[in-house]
Image: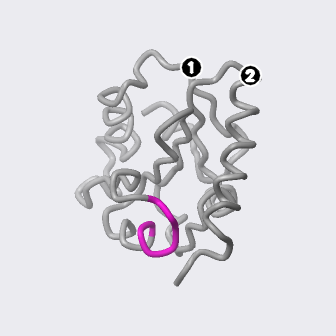
């Protein structure tokens, strides 16, 4: 399934988000709402029931971050490159001793976001306090 809009439309949307990020002094933005992930990339899959997010930075992203079994949909329904699709392993699903966002936080730290000023959607049903704490 091809994205609903042209690549240039999604790039325009991303540029608007980045302009607002710059105005607020942010280096990156974590988006957890499935509707907003779709608006930015066209990502369209029934995967919101499990932790997923979009990381928007000022240069290389956005990065889709979600469950390994949903990574194919991220590639299939968006214009994202393979490097922009960051899955977490299936063995992190439904664990009480760890959270998939801890894995993604490690990825972020390893890719230069450890000291970044990161904004997030605080009114997102799917970006839980546990996800934030990870």
State the extent of the magenta-drawn residues as a range.
74-80
Find numbered disc 2 in the image and state the secondary structure of the residue it sits on.
Answer: loop
**Vertical placement of 11 versus 112: above or below?**
below
User: Where in the figure is residue 115, as x and y percent of width and height?
Assistant: 45, 15
User: Where in the figure is residue 108, as x and y percent of width and height?
Assistant: 38, 33
10 Å crowding of disc 2: few (<14), some (14-19), many (20+): few
| Quadrant of the rendered image containing residue 109 | top left
Image quadrant where one finds the C terminus: top left
**Vertical placement of 66 versus 23: above or below?**
below
**Vertical placement of 79 versus 100: above or below?**
below
Task: Name the foreground residue: 53 vs 14.
Answer: 14
Residue in view at x 29 percent, y 41 percent: 97
Q: Name the residue under label 2.
A: 24
Q: Is residue 100 left or right of residue 128?
A: left
Between the residue at mark 1 and the residue at mark 2, the CA separation in whole angstroms equals: 10 Å
User: Where in the figure is residue 122, as x and y percent of width and height?
Assistant: 69, 37
**Vertical placement of 76 versus 74: above or below?**
below
Find numbered disc 1 in the image and state the secondary structure of the residue it sits on.
Answer: loop
Residue in view at x 48 percent, y 30 percent: 133
Q: Earlier in the sequence, mark 1 or mark 2?
A: 2
Q: Name the residue under label 1.
A: 117
Task: Name the foreground residue: 94 vs 77.
Answer: 77
Residue in view at x 63 percent, y 23 percent: 26
Q: Which residue lies furthest to the bottom in this view?
A: 1
């Amino acid at each position: 399934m091809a994205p609903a809009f042209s690549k240039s439309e999604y790039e325009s949307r991303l540029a608007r988000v980045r302009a607002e990020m710059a105005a607020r002094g942010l280096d990156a933005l974590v988006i957890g709402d499935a509707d907003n992930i779709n608006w930015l990339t066209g990502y369209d899959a029934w995967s919101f029931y499990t932790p997923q997010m979009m990381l928007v930075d000022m240069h290389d992203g956005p990065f889709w971050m979600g469950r390994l079994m949903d990574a194919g949909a991220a590639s299939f329904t968006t214009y994202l490159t393979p490097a922009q699709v960051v899955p977490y392993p299936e063995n992190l699903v439904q664990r009480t001793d760890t959270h998939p966002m801890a894995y993604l936080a490690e990825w972020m730290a390893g890719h230069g976001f450890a000291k970044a000023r990161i904004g997030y959607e605080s009114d997102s049903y799917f970006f839980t306090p546990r996800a934030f704490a990870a």
